[in-house]
Image: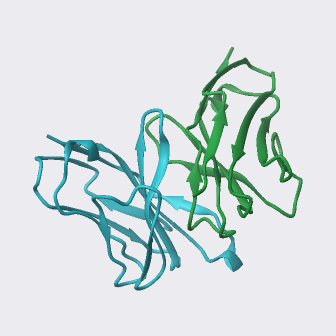
Chain colours: A green, B cyan
């Protein structure tokens, strides 16, 4: 089955700096890669996703890049703000949908003032 | 209001006592899933369902059962709970791929098995 590795496990940045979280996956059949944000005590929420026919996708301050050859994808957050502090999870799916998802172990992002 | 609901939100039980955690969505979603979340392990999928009467194992199905008799409901059953099933459980639902794969999570059920 699919295996997703996520790094780093914790990340501290100053407000206004950029943050990058990286994930690698093992199953070459995976073709859908979402990112979720989970604030303390809350449920995970989808923030951005990318499909394998696209190399990069951007939504305001967040962007995701995908390298299918190397089987890795990354989340980029620019101009970080305190409200970006949360745990971020990457995931991969071989079905192209959110039905069968394997998640990474999460990155705790702390944005300091 | 579009939402996924879970009940109960908190549950303390003892080893071997059967329990059911309910999950319901009002968005007419085809796909539903159950996850458990443990510190350092992230979210792991237990079971998922692509439609009524269609279910399949996720990555950690041992010790769990599910059923999908109606589109809106997807209960998680622990027939003989054990302490290693102490965890935070999330139900989620999503549209078919034609409608977009955004997955909506329920509020979570925190389970403690003594």
Residue B97 % position (x, y): 67, 75
Residue B56, compared with residue B6, is above or below; it is below
Identify which residue is drawn at 58% across, 62% down: B103
Identify which residue is drawn at 47% across, 65% down: B3
* In-front residue for pair B43/A79: B43
* In-front residue for pair A100/B20: A100
Residue A83, compared with residue B12, is above or below; it is above
Residue A25 % position (x, y): 69, 48
Position of the C terminus of chain B, as image quadrant, is: top left
Residue B29 % position (x, y): 53, 76
Identify which residue is drawn at 41% across, 55% down: B60
Q: Quadrant of residue A60?
A: top right
Q: How many marks?
A: 0
Image-based side of A99 in relation to B26, left or right:
right
Identify which residue is drawn at 60% across, 65% down: A98
Residue B68 % position (x, y): 37, 79
Image-based side of B105 in relation to A20, left or right:
left
């Amino acid at each position: 089955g699919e295996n997703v590795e996520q790094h780093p496990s914790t990340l501290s940045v100053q407000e206004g700096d950029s943050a990058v979280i990286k994930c690698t996956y093992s199953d070459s059949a995976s073709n859908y890669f979402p990112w979720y944000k989970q604030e303390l005590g809350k449920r995970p929420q989808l923030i951005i996703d990318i499909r394998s026919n696209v190399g990069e996708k951007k939504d305001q301050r967040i962007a995701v890049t995908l390298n299918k050859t190397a089987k890795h994808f990354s989340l980029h957050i620019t101009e970080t703000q305190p409200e970006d502090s949360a745990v971020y999870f990457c995931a991969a799916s071989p079905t192209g949908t959110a039905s069968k998802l394997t998640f990474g172990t999460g990155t705790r992002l702390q944005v300091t003032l | 209001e579009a939402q996924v609901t879970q009940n109960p939100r908190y549950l303390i039980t003892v080893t071997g006592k059967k329990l059911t955690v309910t999950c319901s969505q009002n968005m007419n979603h085809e796909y539903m899933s159950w996850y458990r979340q443990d510190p350092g392990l992230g979210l792991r999928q237990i079971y998922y369902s692509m439609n009524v009467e269609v279910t399949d194992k996720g990555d950690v199905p041992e010790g769990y059962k599910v059923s999908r008799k109606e589109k809106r409901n997807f209960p998680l059953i622990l027939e003989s709970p054990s302490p290693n099933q102490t965890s935070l459980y999330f139900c989620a639902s999503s549209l078919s791929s034609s409608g977009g794969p955004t997955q909506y999570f329920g509020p979570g059920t925190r389970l403690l098995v003594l």
